[in-house]
Amino acid sequence: MSAEQLAELSDLFVVAAVLLYVVAMIGFAIELAFGRARPGAAARSAAGPLAARKPVTVGATTVDGAPGRDAVTGLPGDHVDAGDDATAPGGDVAATVRDGGAPQSRTAVRAGTAALALAWLGWAANLGAIATRGLAADRWPWGNMYEFVVAICFAAVTAFLLTQVRTNVRFLGSFVMVTAALGLGLAVKTFYTTAGPVVPALDSYWIAIHVSAAIVASGLFTIAGVSGVLYLLRGDGLSRLPARADLERVAHRAIVLAFPVWTFAVIAGALWADRAWGRYWGWDPKEVWSFITWIGYAAYLHARVTAGWRGRSATIVQLVAYGCLLFNLVGVNIFFEGLHSYADVD
């Protein structure tokens, strides 16, 4: 195939990825909407004497008080009284919560399973778009803002799907899918540029090291950011979302993985700058905001370890850091002039 045909195929893959992500988002949303509502901390505290009665695990495979795992999240199930409202799994209704929780039907679970399959197909289309773009341009396919955003969307979905392989986090599915779909739409609508050669400063093997690390870290930070937003939206009463502690745990683990990768990306960027411009650090806007982002996530991790910050305060800190990340990835290239102004955005 010619370069033009490969570039057109890449564009078609992007469109296919957007459509698949949107349909997957709908499936995940159906599962979330018709899944079992879970009580928050305040609702559990208000239960009072119920806590002293024999519990069963709702949404799990056991009903005799033994620990189980929730059918949607894979996290330990909520415990409720083994009274008239506790329904054993196996029928159309998997569980009903005594305090007003909605039943979880097999239809909801099947919608989530189908959505997961569609998410994998969208991931494959996203990967195909990146691969064919690289072949069309005969270089690493993240030399401008369009390619970079497409790659970050791929990294975010990859982080979600790989996490799903180990721990059931389908409750994040609809939110990750809509983030990826909107990101790809933004890339096509605002940042699109035809495949071609890059500026001389980017024509280096360092693009495969520095930018790849930044993309991986950004994908993981996106998972943490989505979890953080859901944490703030999750009320203390009944909710379709998991407990805030579980959402915070997902965000923290993603940041723990992403932070050293981002640190490596900053260091690799300094080494690349020395090769390209003869200095390791020049206070270029991109360099400054990369460092600010690093400080934000370092502050989050430091506050958790030393000050014992948990909950809302820690979540706000990591979301501020994520805002700095987004501005660094997109805003700096649009609003500032500097050595990194290669976004190809009018």
Image (cartoon, rainbow, N blue to C red):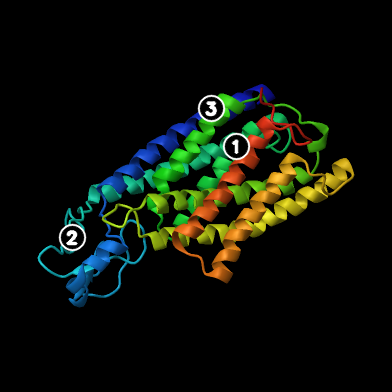
Secondary structure under tag 1 reads helix
Most extreme residue toward the left is 84
Picture coordinates of residue 52, whole percent (x, y):
20, 77
Instruction: Give the side of residue 243 with respect to residue 15, left or right.
Output: left
Q: Nearer the viewer, mark 1 or mark 3?
A: 1
Tag of residue 12: 3
**Amino acid under disc 3:** Leu
Query: Are the residues tagged 1 and 3 within 8 Å (C-beta)?
Result: no
Residue type at numbered disc 2: Asp
Residue at image location 20% in from the left, 71% down from the top = 48
**Which residue in the protein does label 2 denote?**
99
302 is higher (above) or lower (below) than 273: below
Query: Could you say which disc has been placed on residue 149 in the image?
Result: 1
- Please tell me whether residue 168 is drawn above or below residue 344 in the rendered image: below
Is 256 displayed left or right of 43 in the figure?
A: right
Circles 2, 3 touching at the beta carbon (< 8 Å) = no
